[in-house]
C-alpha cells in the first residue's frame, strides 16, 4: 500500500504522517509530498520517502503521485489560487492512476454560505468528475485559529468579532489529522463525505471564558457590527479586500455555518475530540 500525503511540510500534513505512523502504518508505505525541500528533509528522517511538488507546476505532480493507492490532497493555502492548483493535482492523479483521493474540504461545502467554500465546492466537483474513488473530509475550523485572539486578549482583555451568537464546532489539527490517518489507512471510506468537527460547538462568550481560564485574567467577548469590525481591521493594516473577506467569514459564522455538531470526527478517531480549552491551552503554550 502506498499513501501519498500532500501538504506534508505544513502543519496538518505533518500531523497526518505522525498519526499514520502512530496507527501502525509502515514508514515504507508513506510518501510525503511538499513544496519546501528543506522541510521535507526533516520528514525523510522518519524513514518515509519524500518528493518535492508544486501545485503550480504540473510536471512535478504525476511522478509524485504514481503508484499511490491513496492520495491525500490537502487543500492549498493560497485562497483564490486553489482552483488552478487543485485542477493540476486532480489531472495528475488521473494521469498517475491514483486509487483513491482524500480531500480536505469545508463544512457543507456544497450548500454553505461560508465565504471560503466556493473553491472547496468546485474542487469536490472536480474530484467527482475525475471518476477516481474519493473520500471528502469537510473540516470545520481549527481550534488553533484562536491563538491570535488569545494573544490579543492578553493585551486588551477582550475578544472582538462580528459573529454575534454564532457557534463554532472547532477541533484541533491533530484531531482532524488523526481522522485523515484513519480514512487513508483503513477500508470502507469510498464515496463517503465526512462532516468533521468538535463534539460541541462553542460561542464567543465561551471562547472568552476559555481564554480567561488559560491566561488567568478576565476576558470578555465584545460583539461588533460588520462595519465597525471592517473599520478596525483596515485600521490594523489589512487591505479592504482581505478585511471584507474576514467580515464575510464572520457573517457566515453568525448564521450558523460552523455550528453543526455531527459526531463524525469522534466516530472516526474512536475518542472524544479535544475540548476548546485543552486544545487552545496546548496551542498557546
Ligand atoms: N479548517 C481551518 O480552520 C483551516 C485554517 C487554515 C487553513 N486551512 C486549510 O487547510 C490546509 C492545511 O492547513 P495547515 O494548517 O496545514 O496549513 P499550512 O501549515 O500553511 O500548510 C499548507 C501546506 O500546503 C503546501 N502548499 C501550499 N502551496 C503549495 C503549492 N503551490 N504546491 C504544493 N504545496 C503547497 C505547503 O507547502 P510548503 O510549506 O512546503 O510550501 C504546506 O505543506 C490549508 O492549506 C488550508 O487550505 C484550514
Image (cartoon, helix red, strand yellow):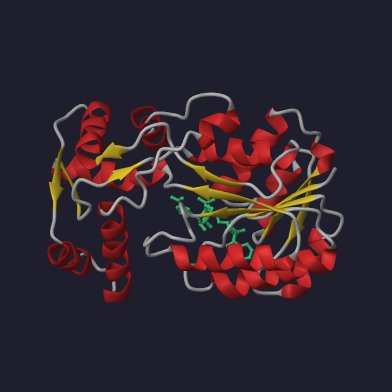
In the image, residue 170 sits, relative to residue 107, either above or below, namely: above
In the image, residue 56 sits, relative to residue 151, either above or below, namely: below
Towards the viewer: 168 or 242: 168
Q: Is residue 171 left or right of residue 105?
A: left
Image quarter for ligand 1 equals bottom right
The image quadrant where one finds the N terminus is: top right
User: Residue 88: x percent and y percent?
Assistant: 69, 72
Q: Residue at x 31, y 58 (%)?
A: 252
Q: Residue at x 64, y 47 (%)?
A: 192
User: Residue 33: x percent and y percent?
Assistant: 71, 55
Which image quadrant for residue 178?
Answer: top right
Q: Residue furthest top?
A: 271
Towards the viewer: 213 or 180: 180
The image quadrant where one finds the C terminus is: top left
User: Residue 150: x percent and y percent?
Assistant: 27, 41
User: Residue 243: x percent and y percent?
Assistant: 27, 68
Q: Is residue 273 left or right of residue 60?
A: left
Q: Residue at x 65, y 62 (%)?
A: 35
Q: Residue at x 52, y 36 (%)?
A: 264
Amino acid at each position: 500500500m502506498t499513501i501519498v500525503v500532500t501538504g506534508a511540510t505544513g502543519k496538518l500534513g505533518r500531523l497526518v504522517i505522525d498519526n499514520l505512523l502512530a496507527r501502525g502504518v509502515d514508514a515504507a508505505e508513506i510518501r510525503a509530498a511538499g513544496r519546501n525541500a528543506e522541510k521535507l528533509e526533516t520528514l525523510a528522517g522518519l524513514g518515509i520517502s519524500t518528493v518535492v511538488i508544486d501545485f503550480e507546476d504540473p510536471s512535478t505532480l504525476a511522478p509524485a503521485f504514481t503508484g499511490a493507492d491513496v492520495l491525500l490532497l490537502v487543500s492549498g493555502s493560497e485562497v483564490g489560487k486553489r482552483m488552478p492548483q487543485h485542477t493540476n493535482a486532480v489531472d495528475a492523479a488521473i494521469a498517475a492512476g491514483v486509487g483513491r483521493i482524500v480531500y480536505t474540504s469545508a463544512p457543507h461545502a456544497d450548500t454553505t454560505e461560508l465565504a471560503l467554500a466556493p473553491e472547496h465546492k468546485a474542487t469536490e466537483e472536480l474530484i467527482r468528475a475525475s471518476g477516481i474513488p474519493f473520500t471528502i473530509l469537510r473540516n470545520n475550523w481549527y481550534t488553533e485559529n484562536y491563538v491570535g485572539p488569545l494573544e490579543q486578549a492578553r493585551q486588551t482583555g477582550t475578544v472582538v468579532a462580528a459573529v454575534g451568537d454564532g457557534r463554532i464546532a472547532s477541533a484541533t489539527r491533530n484531531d482532524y489529522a488523526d481522522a485523515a490517518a484513519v480514512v487513508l489507512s483503513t477500508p470502507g471510506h469510498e464515496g463517503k463525505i465526512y462532516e468533521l468537527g468538535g463534539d460541541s460547538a462553542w460561542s464567543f462568550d465561551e471562547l472568552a471564558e476559555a481564554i480567561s481560564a488559560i491566561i488567568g485574567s478576565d476576558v470578555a467577548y465584545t460583539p461588533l457590527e460588520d462595519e465597525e469590525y471592517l473599520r478596525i481591521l483596515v485600521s490594523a493594516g489589512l487591505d479592504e479586500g482581505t478585511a471584507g473577506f474576514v467580515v464575510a467569514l464572520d457573517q457566515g459564522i453568525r448564521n450558523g455555518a460552523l455550528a453543526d455538531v455531527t459526531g463524525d470526527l469522534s466516530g472516526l478517531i474512536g475518542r472524544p475530540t479535544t475540548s476548546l480549552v485543552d486544545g487552545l491551552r496546548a496551542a498557546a503554550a
